[in-house]
Image (cartoon, rainbow, N blue to C red):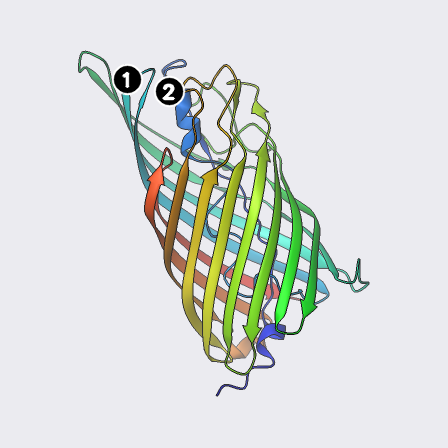
Amino acid sequence: MLTTPEISSKIPRLALSPLIALIIVLGCGKTVQGAELGMSHYLPGVAGDVLIAQSPKPGLQVAMTFWGMYGDLNTAVLQGKVGVSLDLDLSLAIPSAFYTFEEPVLGGTYTMGIAVPFGYANLDAKLTGPQGNSLNGSADSFNLSDIAFTPLQLNWERGSFSFKFAEIIVAPTGAYDINDNVNLGRNYWSFDTVVGITWFNEQTGTELSIAPGIMFNTENDETNYQTGTEFHLDYTANQFLSENFSVGIRGYYYKQITGDSGSGALLGDFKSKSHGIGPGFVWIPKFAAGDLTVLGKWMHDLDSENRFDSDYATLVAAWKF
């Protein structure tokens, strides 16, 4: 039996929301605008790694997240006349800051915050024409991505269960130029409604958390492309082996529930889906007196459709003031 009543108070639970990604536009006119569907503002696994729905302690919390994706996408565009093969390496650094107020709101704790991602993307692509002729290309970019604001997050505690409700706004602040081969901004707004449930047994150090969400997107006015509404679900399972260390499982499920639209959606009612899973850990160093938490994970896509088939790696350092 573990004695773990202090675990939940040690962990800075930053409201790291589904954020930022990148849009890939190859320099071939409108031929491959459908590649916009390869990613979205939802980043698998960014909802959190431990005690996702538990109320943060009042005060300021900051974190630095390093998020990496390594994937490929193969599809046919323009009614099968052109094949596209894409290989993408994407690395993001995401500094974030959240403040939890002491005064309760609607019987729960109120938190607001911001995350400002920037990073590097490298893309290799091959376009194959109807006669079998091909064009190979490579491009990269280091720049700011789209900033995510959390104006509202509420958390409630009920015995061993915790609940969360959050509204996240992703603004088109990232670098974007339709004439560039790779952009780290997506040039449209996203509005994400996320809820979370955590069950934590303090006697055994066992945790289960889920965080489903619905993301609505506006149209990219440069490409006249509107990504459809997206459902996403992140989940975690942790077993604390001591008060300072746990291991567990991380996973996600993603599916577009409405198709893409707009004159730039050349593939028509185009939808994507994917899901992945992998191991993760939580470390609360003793030397930091519980103020520092280090979290890491790796996830592998088990299946993907009209979306990059990827591996994801995340490392987070979170500090509570």
Q: Amino acid at mark 1?
A: Val
- Label 2 secondary element: loop
Residue most extreme to the left: 132
CA separation, marks 1 and 2?
9 Å
Q: Nearer the viewer, residue 284 or 190?
A: 190
User: Residue at left 17%, top 15%?
Assistant: 132
- Label 1 secondary element: strand
Residue for badge 1:
82
Q: Which mark is residue 32?
A: 2
Q: Nearer the viewer, residue 23 or 4?
A: 4
Q: Nearer the viewer, residue 83 or 96?
A: 83
User: Residue at left 28%, top 17%?
Assistant: 82
Image position, residue 15 (x, y; %): 61, 55
User: Residue at left 68%, top 68%?
Assistant: 157
Is 182 situated above or below 68?
above
Q: Quadrant of residue 280?
A: bottom left
Position of residue 52 in the picture relative to residue 78 (left or right): right
Residue 261 shows in the view: yes
Q: Amino acid at mark 2?
A: Val
